[in-house]
Amino acid sequence: MTSLGQSQYSVPMLVNPTGDIGSVALEPVDLAVRGEGAHDEEWLQKLLHDQPSLIPVDDIEPAFSGLTPVCRELPTGVGPIDNVYVNERGLLTFVECKLWRNPEARRKVVGQILDYAQQVSRWMLADFDAALGKSVAPAGAGLWEIAKEAFSLDDEARFLDRVQHHLSNGTFLLLIVGDGIRESTEDIARFMNQHAGLSFALGLVEMGLFNLPGDERLLVQPRVLAKTVEIGRLIVRAEDGVRIEQTDNKAAKQSPGSSGSSRRTLTEELFIEEVAGNSSLADKLREFFAKIQENGLRIEATPRGASLKIVAGEPGMNIATLSKKGTWRNYGCGDSEEGRRYLRALAALFPDGVVKEGGNDGGWSWTVQSADGRNYHIEDLVAHADEWLALLRDLEAND
């Protein structure tokens, strides 16, 4: 049986300016079983409610970034969700706080959080707000009131429509947070297959606690141990990026336009949904993303999943940035001769394409546009995908 292995923490150290005499390794603090110590599961739950920035969402699914707490102990009918968060896009994150050395937690927690998500996916907004009223530490009377206050929103109908859409699809980020986390990948795969109707992402996060010498405060060190890197299909070890188990999630295989070689994250799928909805462009984008990956390029999200970057090589040149508004640009490519050569070749693919030069900014804002100054639509790039990829191969071969 393959397991996720023991913690790979190195002990943090306070180091003097000289780096030698007086440097101190920090003493780790163990979390306790609920009710058996000052720093127990309930303490962790409260900490994460008050300090959501401790949750490394950007490292798991950037589309869910910008968390604001909704409540603790949200009743679902099959058990309470420890921590609930929402962001301005109406995406919900559920967190379970568990000590992995608790044998009952080891056996149940992955299945537990998935069962909670399955139950919530059957709710309407009124059901969610009704449960919120029975929760611990609700941040407002209803989900809209919480989001409006946190994000200064003014379009209630748009926000609530998004929330209901995500509820109905089971589009959630599910996080298990604790210490000494262990779980067999076979068990995770089994639980994920049992919940194939959801469109969720799953992450395991370890929280390291360390005493600061001569201080009552603690150093808290969050670390992603494992996460889904496809929609319900793959688990990886975060410390080295090695794939350790592939599951057979029917939802991933049956998603529109998917193929055996396509590996879409939930952030990418949400981007496609926002740009293209249910139009024919959505399937074209899925095929386009598959081609990108097959050609050795990477798709990376900008902070909060606002845009997607297509990146080539190491350390990586951003060769196109796709905006949720439906356009693309090339900012950053013009700061090198290699990049300027790429932009000129890219512009030549379009009958009216030109390279817009940014003046005295070092080439940062150079981009390909139409001759009349219009940014091209993503669909224009998709239509030229094969030519564009051939161009990139030719440029690489001539370097």
Image (cartoon, grey):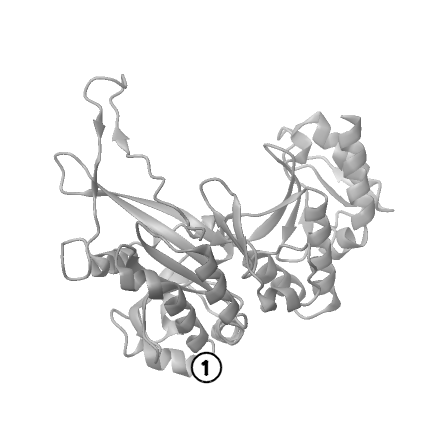
The residue indicated by pointer 1 is 124
Vertical comparison of 99 with 94: above or below = above
Locate residue 239, reporting x and y percent.
44, 41
Name the residue at 79% across, 40% down.
346
Location of the C terminus (image quadrant):
top right
Q: Residues within 10 Å of mark 1 (few under 14, many from 20)?
A: some
Residue type, mark 1 in image: Met
Image spot of residue 394 (x, y percent): 81, 34
Name the residue: 67% across, 42% down: 297
| Quarter of the rendering containing residue 125 | bottom left
Say whether residue 250 is visible: yes
Where is residue 110 drawn, in percent x and y? 39, 63
Q: Nearer the viewer, residue 181 or 265?
A: 181
Identify the image quadrant of residue 187. Answer: bottom left
- Report the residue at 27% width, 79% height from top: 134
Examine the rendered structure and indicate whether residue 197 appears above or below residue 152: below
